[in-house]
Image (cartoon, helix red, strand yellow):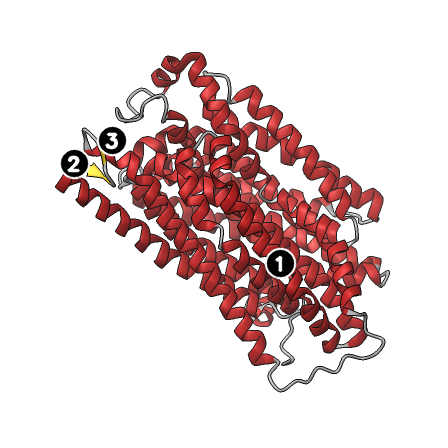
Amino acid sequence: MKKNGQNFLEGAMLLTLSTLIVKVIGALFKIPLANILGGVGMSYYVSAYDIFTPIYSMTATGLGIAASRLVAEQAAVFGAEGGREVLRASRRVFLLLGLLGMGLLLVLAPAFARTINNPGATLAVCAIAPAVVFSCISAVYRGYFQGMTNMIPTAKSQVLESLVRLTAGTAFSYGVTLFLRRRYLETGAVLGRSFATLDEASLFLFRFSAAAAIAGVTASTMAGALYIRGRYRRETRGLHHSRKRETASPKGLVLRLLQIAIPISLSTLVVNLTSVIDLMSVMNCLKTAIASDGAAIRQMYDGLIPAAVTNDLLPEYLYGSYSGLAFSLFNLAPAITAALGVSALPAVTRAFAGGNREQLAETVNSVLRIALLTALPAGLGLSVLSGPILRFLFPARLMEAAIITPVLQVMGISTILVAVTTPVNSVLQATGHERLALGMMLTGAAVKLFTNYRLVSRPELNIRGVPYGTLLCYGLILLVSLGFLRVGVGIRLKFGQVVAKPLFCALLCAGAAYSSYYLLFSSVSASMRLLAAIALGGAVYLAALLLTRTLQKSDLEMLPNHEKIKKGLEKRGLIS
């Protein structure tokens, strides 16, 4: 294999950059999709995608992390051949797990849709089942490359997946919607079922449009798997299998992989904990609230619920508005900081295994500082500009955007906690404390579930009760996890440099963005005001980071031409 590995910060830069690209493309996908499907259609799409997301996390992320860790261990002892031996031993295991997961989804799809009180999502759940197999195939190869400190194949495969998802998912969904609407206008029926109005017909055909969009997701995972497998074959072409006697046996490697993978795969659910709990509870709670006082809920959203949305469809409408419009924005910062955790894992593992406490503390503090530098301005900005952002991104769904604006205001704060929890969870895994991470996840899940049932079931709160459970859940997980890193692992966190300075700069950023939108640029259009507010907030944030010397030299190593940038800032005394 080529000598093209990267150090921690270079790997973090690559994965962060690819994650940014993926999230931008994902937004380009979710925005037109939400405008096509609306609240009800998005509830079908999200129900299928949210049951796939934790499975994907446990395979492509969780199993990939386990493979990465084992590859790094074996390569450190036996060289590159040790890493390849792990890959060869784990391929069949990963494929078997993928086939099992696909079979379970196909068989249990109707029962699952009934359980979450969203039977219209059954077809979409079936459409995403094959993606489990492809994600497992990708996981073993991504884990291999990451364990060899080469993040390029993972980054490229992620970008390819997102591009295919955008093009195929949008084309499939729009094409099916257009075809079925045209058939209704010609015949007055959709697939043999008659409807009085086009609005009623649209609410029915959206289940097929959502399934078509999900088929695009499945196609994207297949493209990613084919690419990264081909990349491995090209880079190892001509290398002969010559396993040394002292290398662990394939059976031993599989057992070791499963030993690492099971707690890690389960604990990776912490990233998707919110969506999993919400998927299983929110619509049931909304049905309870509507049954208790549906009139009060309709009065609360007077003028924001289409006439065709009956009380039977109202839970899907509210949940789809939350998950389709707000949740994709909420998940942006955590997805970026997850890349930091993945890239840092080999470095943390080596420092911990080698007993290098100084290097371990430096790496962990760097990860947390960079995570907060990313999450704080994103979360606070999302909170103070939630309404303008939703109206800008979803102009065809202004009613749904108005309903969900107060929810996103609270979610903006929660996203900061989730974004920091993700890399902290990776550090716990890298230092051999997978069970603690899993235990905290289960505790957080209990808090989230209890809060949902207590708040969302109340008619006066309904969908607005969802983000408070997220806030309590991740606040508890983060508090206990950081405490254990300090006491149990012995890592001293530099509070001033890691938390206080980034928070101060982010507050200035959010204040500048809010003030500029509502005061400075009131004479221009809403879209221009929003873009100007974001630009001004970003400029204030960058200036504050430099003037307070919050940035450190190591942070700039993630940037191209960082040596020139560091020298220029050092001359002016703007970095520490």
Which residue, given by chain and number where applicable, does mark 1 sit on?
96
In the picture, measured across the screen, residue 356 lies left or right of residue 458, that is right
Check disc 2 and give the amino acid type.
Gly
In the picture, measured across the screen, residue 190 lies left or right of residue 383, that is left
Query: Number of marks in the image?
Result: 3
Which residue is depicted at the point 72% across and 77% down? 80
- Between the residue at mark 1 and the residue at mark 2, the CA separation in whole angstroms equals 46 Å
Which residue, given by chain and number where applicable, does mark 2 sit on?
188
Closer to the camera, 419 or 203? 203
Label 1 neighbour load within 10 Å: few <14, some 14-19, many 20+: some
Which residue is depicted at the point 22% across and 47% down? 178
Task: Give whichever of discs 1 and 2 has the lower sequence position.
Answer: 1
- Between the residue at mark 1 and the residue at mark 3, the CA separation in whole angstroms equals 43 Å
- Between the residue at mark 3 and the residue at mark 2, the CA separation in whole angstroms equals 11 Å
Per the image, label 1 sits on a secondary structure element best described as helix
Looking at the picture, how far across and down is residue 374, in whole percent?
56, 50
Task: Give whichever of discs 3 and 2 has the lower sequence position.
Answer: 2
Check disc 1 and give the amino acid type.
Leu
**Image-quadrant location for residue 350:** bottom right
3 vs 2, front mark: 2
Which residue, given by chain and number where applicable, does mark 3 sit on?
200
Q: Taking the image as drawn, is residue 331 in sight? A: no
In the picture, measured across the screen, residue 547 lies left or right of residue 263, that is left
Closer to the camera, 451 or 231? 231
Looking at the picture, how far across and down is residue 534, in whole percent?
41, 46
In the rendered image, the quadrant that contains the N terminus is bottom right
